[in-house]
């Protein structure tokens, strides 16, 4: 890594982006490819052959020896199979480097080993990857050398989506079609496309690699299954936005450089609330590119950490008692000529198009709150959501004082006549300038908050793909826009109809708007009174995928079929059961092989010391006896809890697969895990640190 980084020079240098295509492709080929990217026009094999050749030549110049169809199966991580550019040796023993349009457009990985939720039998192996030309290819450099990575969709032999990208692209088409209808009603005849734009803020933890290697729970599950809180955690708030440590600064510098080379616009970096926790946020991008970039970013975060003797933890809750990590999904709708449909302007009460878009989204979120909650469902997120660090599991919308006041005017009088303005902020210090503050505050407890010209969906977990939540956001918005357009296009008086529709949506869906403290215990009772769904766990949320309401929604916009939704539900249940099973077996392994032997050694040393002291004479050993008694009692509790966990874990595979097994894991196994953790964490506070078999929380989070 160089001492000086010229960002403008290196940005996108390893990406086959528009400027590279324009430079290297013949003008006709470039124009045809742009039509495919921008208009969805079918790409001929003749054009694909030319693109593939130039892409190969460019990649080889970048040091690539292999290419890979880079895709996102339903495993939570990306997948790839590498093929060299070489062809069969010629008679003279030489080889040629080739890459055809067919190889660019289509790949055939084995689909039998990826999650399919029953869509495919194990013996039915064929699956296809197909080039997504809207997301640029890139060359990735690592220990294997250079690899040309081609973003692709992944589907089964029978056409069902087996990945994250395919439904995301379908949902983008759905919201584009309906959003164009809406803006046409307001006289916009120039915009040709409406694209969801997303900026995904990525939170993560950094810990020392040597200490990570001493924690089987972190290695196997990504989170600590045991661990007592240190005397100091995050309660002083001194880590948040604090000075970044030098070791971490060096790491962040290299992360930025690698991101920038791959066209990922990493912009904001800072310390987060918990010790050893940090955040990296990019600039907005079209949602399919943003989803690809986030996967690239997560891989870079992990890879670079290893180079610096650290490990990057992306689990939603690696440390109990400390803030977990999320991925705030900032979502907006933007036309190809730069109009943000969620920009209220200076006078929102007069911006009728914005008010219609806003109330349509309120309707969408209220109608499909269960689906939006499910889109952020993850095993790790069950430990994060609802704590005093993350949004509650109840979906609500924060609008802020200005927009809430506009809606109240519409509801009460039918007309909005004014918008609240931001006032002057006076610091009281003559040398500091006074300035206009925003018309509304922010609310970090809201799951779905309006933040000026976008909505911030804060529920998504740190290691999750952002595709799932954006598929839901795009599709529910498309449905709301469609229903509004159907009515308005048939109305004899458009102005009157749009006025009435905005008031109707604002009134009927007012219950979803909540500007208060989402952490307050009173909110749960208030949400219940309003009739809002409360789905505290992943297992509670999964059924939202297969309701008739969800099936009708997704099938009507060709985003998912019923079979695809049912398969995804089965995959989610399977993921939950497997994750809990792994965690339970890891706890048993650690307790059996490390913790119980360590406590026995300690109590033996303690007992020997008591006998030794007693032998000296009439000496008070009450302190030692009390400590020995406490440890012995807790050791017995640990053994009993471990035996109970072993028993219930052993029965997991006897429970029918799917929802029944997932419910068993949540209701029985998870509770047994919690029962084992309690005495172990108490023992950690009593046993000699030198004899405790693993690094403590303090060792992990303060020694980076």
Image (cartoon, rainbow, N blue to C red):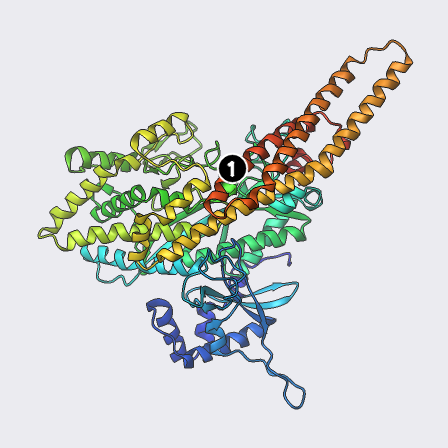
Q: Residues within 10 Å of mark 1 (few under 14, many from 20)?
A: some
Quadrant the C terminus occupies: top right
Where on the picture, by quarter, is residue 232?
top right
171 up-or-down from 451: above or below: below
Q: Residue furthest bottom?
A: 91
Residue 265 visible to an observer of this rendering = no
Residue 648 visible to an observer of this rendering = yes
Foreground residue among 160 and 225: 160
Q: Position of residue 222 (x, y in %)?
A: 60, 45
Q: Position of residue 217 (x, y in %)?
A: 64, 42
551 up-or-down from 47: above or below: above
Quadrant the N terminus occupies: bottom right
Residue at the disc numbered 1? 383
Residue located 37% across and 45% down the image: 544
Residue located 25% across and 39% down the image: 509
- 600 on left or right of 405: right
Residue located 46% across and 59% down the image: 163
Q: Position of residue 31 (x, y in %)?
A: 37, 75
Foreground residue among 645 and 19: 645
Q: Residue furthest left?
A: 492
Where on the picture, by quarter, is residue 695?
top right
């Amino acid at each position: 890594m160089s001492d000086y980084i010229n960002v403008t020079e290196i940005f996108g240098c390893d990406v086959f982006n528009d400027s590279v295509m324009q430079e290297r492709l013949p003008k006709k080929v470039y124009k045809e490819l742009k039509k495919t990217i921008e208009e969805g026009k079918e790409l001929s094999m003749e054009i694909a052959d030319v693109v593939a050749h130039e892409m190969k030549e460019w990649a080889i110049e970048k040091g690539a020896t292999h290419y890979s169809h880079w895709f996102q199966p339903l495993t939570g991580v990306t997948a790839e199979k590498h093929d060299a550019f070489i062809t069969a040796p010629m008679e003279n023993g030489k080889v040629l480097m080739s890459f055809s349009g067919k190889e660019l457009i289509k790949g055939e990985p084995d689909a039998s080993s990826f999650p399919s939720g029953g869509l495919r039998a194990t013996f039915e192996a064929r699956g296809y990857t197909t080039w997504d030309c809207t997301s640029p290819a890139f060359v990735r450099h690592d220990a294997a050398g250079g690899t040309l990575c081609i973003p692709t969709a992944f589907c089964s032999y029978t056409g069902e989506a087996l990945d994250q990208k395919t439904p995301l692209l379908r949902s983008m088409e759905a919201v584009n079609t309906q959003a164009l209808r809406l803006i046409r009603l307001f006289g916009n005849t120039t915009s040709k496309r409406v694209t969801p734009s997303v900026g995904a803020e990525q939170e993560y933890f950094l810990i020392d690699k040597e200490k990570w290697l001493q924690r089987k729970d972190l290695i196997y599950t990504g989170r600590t299954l045991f661990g007592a809180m240190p005397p100091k955690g995050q309660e002083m708030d001194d880590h948040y936005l604090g000075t970044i440590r030098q070791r971490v600064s060096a790491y962040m510098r290299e992360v930025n450089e690698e991101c920038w080379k791959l066209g990922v616009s990493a912009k904001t970096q800072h310390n987060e609330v918990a010790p050893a926790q940090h955040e990296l946020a990019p600039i907005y991008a079209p949602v399919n590119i943003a989803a690809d970039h986030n996967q690239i970013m997560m891989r870079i975060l992990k890879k670079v950490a290893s180079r610096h003797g650290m490990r990057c933890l992306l689990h939603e809750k690696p440390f109990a008692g400390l803030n977990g990590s999320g991925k705030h999904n900032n979502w907006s709708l933007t036309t190809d000529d730069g109009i943000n449909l969620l920009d209220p302007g200076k006078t929102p009460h007069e911006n009728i198009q914005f008010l219609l878009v806003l109330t349509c989204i309120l309707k969408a979120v209220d109608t499909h709150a269960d689906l939006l909650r499910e889109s952020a469902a993850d095993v790790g997120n069950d430990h994060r959501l609802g704590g005093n660090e993350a949004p509650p599991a109840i979906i609500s919308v924060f609008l802020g004082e200005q927009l809430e006041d506009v809606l109240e005017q519409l509801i009460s009088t039918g007309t909005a006549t004014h918008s609240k303005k931001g006032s002057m902020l006076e610091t009281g210090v003559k040398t500091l300038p006074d300035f206009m503050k925003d018309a509304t505050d922010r609310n970090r407890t809201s799951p779905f908050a309006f933040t000026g010209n976008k909505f911030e969906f804060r529920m998504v977990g740190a290691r999750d793909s952002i595709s799932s939540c954006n598929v839901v956001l795009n599709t529910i918005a498309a449905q709301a826009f469609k229903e509004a357009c159907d009515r308005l296009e048939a109305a004899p008086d458009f102005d009157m109809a749009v006025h009435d529709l905005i008031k109707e949506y604002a009134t009927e869906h007012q219950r979803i708007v909540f500007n208060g403290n989402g952490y307050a215990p009173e909110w749960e009772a208030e949400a219940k009174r309003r009739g809002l769904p409360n789905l505290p766990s992943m297992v509670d949320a999964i059924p939202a995928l297969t309701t008739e309401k969800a099936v009708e929604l997704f099938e009507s916009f060709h985003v998912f079929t019923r079979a695809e939704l049912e398969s995804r539900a089965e995959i989610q249940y399977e993921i939950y059961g497997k994750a809990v099973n792994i965690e339970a077996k890891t706890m048993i392994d650690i307790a059996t092989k490390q913790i119980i032997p360590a406590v026995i050694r300690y109590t033996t040393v303690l007992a020997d010391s008591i006998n030794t002291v007693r032998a000296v004479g009439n000496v008070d050993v009450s302190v030692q006896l009390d400590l020995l008694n406490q440890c012995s009692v807790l050791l017995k509790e640990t053994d009993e809890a471990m035996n109970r966990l072993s028993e219930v874990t052993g029965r997991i595979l006897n429970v029918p697969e799917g929802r029944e097994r997932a419910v068993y894991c949540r209701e029985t196994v998870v509770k047994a895990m919690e029962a084992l953790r309690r005495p172990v964490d108490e023992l950690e506070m009593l046993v000699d640190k030198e004899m405790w078999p693993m690094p403590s929380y303090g060792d992990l989070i303060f020694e980076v």
